[in-house]
Amino acid sequence: MNILLLGGGGREHALAWKMAQSPLCDKLYAAPGNPGVAAHAELVSLDLTDHAAVIAFCEAHRIGLVVIGPEAPLVDGLADSLRGAGFSVFGPSRAAAQIEGSKGFTKDLCQRAGIPTAAYVRAGSLAEARAALGGFSIPVVIKADGLAAGKGVVIAETLAQAEAALDDMFGGQFGSAGTEVVIEEFLTGEEASFFALTDGSTIVPFGSAQDHKRVGDGDTGPNTGGMGAYSPARVLTPLLEAEAIEKIVAPTVRAMADAGMAYSGVLYAGLMLTADGPSLIEYNARFGDPECQVLMMRLESDLVELLSACADNRLSAIEPPRFSPDPALTVVMAAQGYPGTPKQGGRIDGIGLAEAHGARVFHAGTSLDGNGKLSASGGRVLNVTARGATVRAARDAAYAAVAAIDFAEGFCRNDIGYREIEREDAAGSDRV
Ligand code: AMP
Ligand code: GLY
């Protein structure tokens, strides 16, 4: 079949790389894609907010499956428009994507369905929000309701910080995303991401990962979209995973179907592993970026078969996905200045050398200049990804590949995977 992949980051490069390996994939198109995606797909220029244009492209190119990578087109209802025109789409409807697009929507859903999550209050005005603050202890978490590119969450360590965050959000810091806020209880524990494919009834576990959100080594500095990740997240033991499915994911899928907005696509559950068990921090309506890169590095099954079965409500009829037991780890190389204003145009060389020993370099924010030279054109630029028998081995292989890349105006964290490697070391010394 012909496939159209939407999006242009490292997540989409990993999806394109994996889909292109499928015997079910005849021709892969990507919009907008990037120079890395171009190795696997024909890049096309499409305005994703112009649904009629996307539909016209799918008709003209006999597209059998549309895979929507990022959240914005999902929240904008592109999946609904395409399904309305008769196309198979991997990705939830506009109504179902509220699970990511509105934090208040998800909190209310959890409350109705008895899903473990932090206690919360929704507030639609500054006065209401300030009044609600009194009911929480410090630290307290303040979240803009809508999409804020991962920046709409403040963990306030003092009442003054909480009030300042509310002033900023209602003052328009996040535009319409901040006209409503969620104030919630601060949870403690270790975080893990869990992924499941669902067609609205069948739920298929699709791996776990942990990412590193802060920009600096040792989890310091401002939050980013993610500076690196590894999979699996072993802290999410099989028992805890089963508990997360039973108490969080399955009741969510049921509640969404009962509310007439069946969820179809990948459900990304951000979990806090608290002393009382897994608690939901947030849902995303798409694959994580860079978590997708490490999942794809481990996936042994045919991705097109899985995404297509999900899109066509056939998940119960296919083999569950198989993942390599070997961990995978990705290091994000970002442009200097990220997560503030990243320096654009930095030259990149050495990707071939980096890949010579089995690492994969997914492009996240790159472009080609007139002479065919690769340069940085985003905040997160490259995702240098490797597999190994242990997280330490995957880490060493990924950093060996990083060392082969010449990107003078880039930087990366030097400690991706450190928590898991400490645990591996501790387990190793127990055995001696
Ligand atoms: P979110 O965008 O909802 O994933 O939040 C971003 C980050 O803020 C999460 O990855 C957590 O590290 C942190 N966070 C969000 N909600 C809470 C909470 N209720 N308690 C503790 N940390 C939280
Ligand atoms: N890496 C976090 C996310 O994709 O939301």
Image: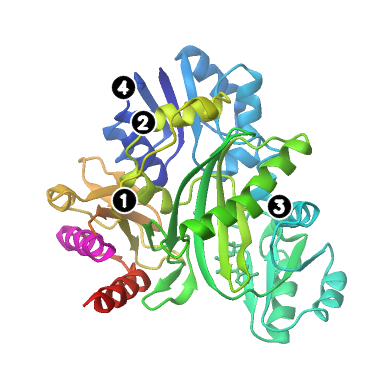
Alpha carbon distance from label 2 to label 3:
32 Å
Horizontal side, residue 249 vs residue 395: left or right: right
Left or right: residue 406 versus residue 368 is: left
Q: Quadrant of the C terminus?
A: bottom left
User: Relative to the observer, which residue lies in front, 197 or 350?
Assistant: 197
Which residue is denoted by mark 3 in the rendering? 102
Report the front residue among 207 and 413.
207
Residue 23 is tagged as 4
Judged by its main secondary structure, the magenta piece is helix
Q: Quadrant of residue 119?
A: bottom right
Magenta span of residues: 390-404
Res 401 → quadrant: bottom left
Question: Looking at the image, is mark 2 or mark 1 earlier in the sequence?
Answer: 2
Q: Secondary structure at mark 2?
A: loop
Mark 2 highlights which residue?
A: 302
Q: Amino acid at mark 4?
A: Pro
Judge the density around disc 3: few (<14), some (14-19), many (≥20) Cα neighbours within 10 Å: many
Q: Which numbered disc flags the more N-terminal residue, 2 or 4? A: 4
Q: Position of residue 47 (x, y in %)?
A: 53, 32
Q: Report the quarter where the N terminus lies.
A: top left
Ligand 1 visible in quadrant? bottom right
- Rendering coords of residue 225 (x, y %): 47, 60
Q: Residue at x 48, y 51 (%)?
A: 288
Decide which of tag 2 and tag 3 comes sooner along the chain.
3
Reading the image, the residue beneath label 1 is 325
Q: Is residue 10 left or right of residue 264?
A: left
Q: State the separation of the CA atoms marked 2 and 1.
A: 17 Å
